[in-house]
Image (cartoon, helix red, strand yellow):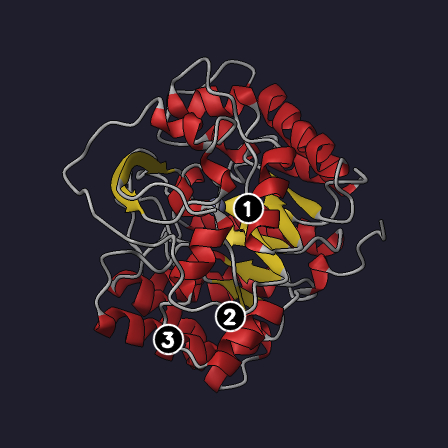
């Protein structure tokens, strides 16, 4: 249903380690059901504050309508407690599985991979919370209970900060959980994994080895911390390839945001170049590696930026590129809008069809309704 012209909304993008409250304004010219009373946009609108980098976009009306993706490979739910922590608003409602299902339905997407937000309880650049590990377990378990309500639609990956003393204990616990054993999400930015620090790399390698032993695939937000100004580019991507990917040779690994942190800049391109080179050389370590293109396309991107991203996707090979939306914290991030944004890339209809139809191994074998 077509609603208002020129509705102005404020929304935050929440998965970058330092861009949690980066605020965009945008106009919507076509808004479907999603924005009504129950909308998760509340999670952020209540907290939105203006920033210097407002941008205007006209995203919610897709330029064309290629078949919707089968899978949204990068989603999040927020318990009310996690939403309160992230937004600073004690009344933030969170994002439930029911809300996500409605948004997937309005985009025509069948299934989603839900990456637990438990790691945010151990966020490196936020003041520590009391009883952190209890909160981590509670968030993972809440996420498990949410996805269990939609066994034919949603699957959850467990998460935690891999540098924390409880990391291996939580991984072992998740490996035995009927909902959480499917895989692991790590966020190097949020957790401040410094790929230039051998101690950090050694700790994370232990987590990769253990996940490999438990046959748990890994989704990794590889981009290092922007808050803590860690270096990021080709050197850090090489550490990942040589020391971390090599530690989990038997499980699929999904590198989020095309190896960036949302958007696409020269550091992301340099990191991604390490992987496109390895793929070109038929490097065995890349055999089970997937890439999600979640929130890579931004409203402000020039045709040249879009061309570059499309070229990199072709170098990776469209058969290993997955569509993802990220948490529906604002209408800009709803799956329908995200897929419309992705289609701004100058990919051919056939290439778009391949991406839309890709199903990574860990999103197969769903229960029949
Ligand atoms: Zn995310």
Q: Which residue is mark 1?
A: 75
Q: Position of residue 284 (x, y in %)?
A: 59, 78
Q: Nearer the viewer, residue 6 or 194?
A: 6
Q: Is residue 74 above or below residue 351?
A: above
Element type at marker 3?
Answer: helix
Q: Position of residue 40 (x, y in %)?
A: 48, 31
Mark 3 surroundings: few (<14), some (14-19) or many (≥20) residues within 10 A: some
Q: Is residue 75 above or below residue 244?
A: above
Instruction: Of the two numbered discs 3 and 2 on the same chain, state the one appearing first in sequence.
Output: 2
Instruction: Of the two numbered discs 2 and 1 on the same chain, state the one appearing first in sequence.
Output: 2
Respond yes or no on whether mark 2 lies under 8 Å from ligand 1.
Answer: no
Q: Name the side, left or right, on which 171 lies relative to 194.
A: right
Q: Which residue is mark 3?
A: 310
> Residue lying farthest left?
52
Query: Marks 3 and 1: CB-CB under 8 Å?
Result: no
From mark 3 to mark 1, how far is it between C-alphas? 22 Å
Instruction: Of the two numbered discs 3 and 1 on the same chain, state the one appearing first in sequence.
Output: 1
Element type at marker 1?
Answer: strand
Q: Is residue 262 above or below residue 146?
A: below
* Residue 181 location, quadrant: top right
From mark 2 to mark 1, how far is it between C-alphas? 21 Å
Q: Which residue is mark 2?
A: 66
Residue pictured at 69% horizontal, 29% vertical: 141
Q: Is residue 23 above or below residue 217?
A: above
Residue pictured at 27% horizontal, 44% vertical: 27
Q: Position of residue 229 (x, y in %)?
A: 25, 44
Element type at marker 2?
Answer: loop
> Residue lying farthest right?
368
């Amino acid at each position: 249903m077509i609603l208002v012209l020129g509705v102005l909304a404020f929304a935050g993008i929440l998965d970058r380690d330092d861009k949690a409250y980066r605020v965009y304004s945008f106009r919507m010219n076509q808004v479907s059901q999603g924005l009504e009373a129950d909308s998760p946009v509340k999670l952020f609108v209540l907290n939105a504050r203006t920033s210097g980098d407002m941008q205007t976009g006209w995203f919610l009306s897709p330029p064309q309508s290629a078949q919707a993706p089968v899978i949204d490979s990068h989603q999040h739910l927020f318990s009310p407690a996690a939403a309160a922590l992230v937004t600073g608003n004690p009344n933030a409602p969170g994002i439930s599985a029911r809300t996500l299902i409605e948004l997937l339905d309005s985009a025509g997407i069948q299934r989603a991979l839900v990456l637990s937000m438990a790691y945010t309880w151990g966020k490196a650049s936020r003041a520590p919370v009391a009883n952190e590990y209890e909160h981590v377990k509670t968030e993972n378990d809440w996420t498990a209970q949410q996805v269990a309500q939609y066994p034919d639609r949603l699957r959850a990956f467990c998460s935690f900060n891999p540098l924390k003393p409880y990391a291996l204990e939580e991984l072992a616990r998740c490996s035995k959980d009927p909902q959480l054993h499917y895989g692991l999400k790590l966020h190097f930015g949020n957790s401040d994994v410094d790929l230039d620090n051998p101690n950090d790399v050694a700790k994370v390698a232990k987590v990769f080895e253990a996940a490999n032993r438990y046959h748990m695939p890994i989704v990794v937000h590889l981009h290092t911390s922007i808050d803590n100004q860690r270096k990021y580019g080709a050197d850090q991507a090489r550490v990942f390839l040589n020391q971390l990917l090599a530690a989990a040779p038997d499980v699929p690994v999904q590198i989020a945001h095309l190896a960036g942190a949302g958007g696409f800049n020269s550091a992301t391109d340099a990191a991604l170049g390490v992987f496109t080179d390895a793929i070109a050389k038929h490097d065995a370590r890349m055999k089970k590696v997937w890439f999600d293109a979640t929130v890579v396309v931004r409203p402000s991107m020039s045709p040249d930026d879009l061309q570059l991203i499309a070229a990199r996707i072709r170098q990776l090979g469209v058969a290993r590129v997955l569509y993802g939306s990220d948490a529906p914290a604002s209408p800009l991030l709803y799956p329908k809008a995200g897929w419309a944004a992705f289609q701004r890339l100058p990919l051919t209809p056939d290439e778009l069809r391949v991406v839309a139809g890709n199903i990574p191994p860990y999103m197969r074998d769903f229960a029949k309704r």
